[in-house]
Image: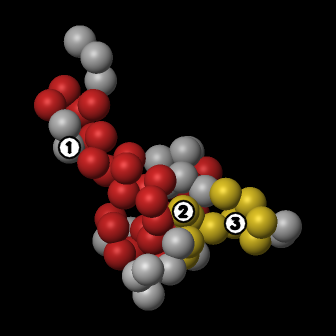
């Protein structure tokens, strides 16, 4: 098993994957552009879901059926 975390904070995910600011990261999460899960009062980004989303977006036609 990897030492990589399964979730990360919204600002860290936004910065690491998209080079977004803290506010930009929260705005993207609010729009649904960064996937989130709620754990109690805490919002976290599931790393696997984010990476799947990015993999799908890099497919031809942005992962959309044409």
Q: Which mark is residue 58?
A: 1
Asked if 62 appears above or below 1 in the picture, the reply is above
Residue at which label 2 appears: 46
- Residue 20 position by quadrant: bottom left
Sequence-wise first label, 3 or 1: 3
Q: How is the image coloured?
A: secondary structure
Image quarter (top left, top right, bottom left or bottom right) of the C terminus: top left
Can residue 11 be seen in this snapshot? no
Q: Residue at x 27, y 41 (%)?
A: 57
Mark 3–mark 2 Cα distance, whole angstroms, equals: 10 Å
Asked if residue 63 lies left or right of residue 13, the reply is left
| Position of residue 41 measured from the top left corner of the image (x, y, whole percent) | 83, 69
Residue at which label 3 appears: 43
Can residue 66 be seen in this snapshot? yes
Identify the secondary structure beneath mark 1. Answer: loop
Q: Residue furthest bottom?
A: 3
């Amino acid at each position: 098993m990897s030492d990589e975390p399964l979730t990360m904070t919204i600002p860290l995910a936004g910065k690491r994957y998209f080079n977004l600011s803290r506010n930009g990261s929260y705005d993207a999460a609010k729009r649904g552009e960064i996937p989130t899960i709620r754990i109690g009062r805490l919002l976290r980004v599931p790393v696997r879901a984010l990476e799947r989303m990015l993999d799908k977006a890099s497919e031809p036609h942005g992962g959309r059926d044409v």
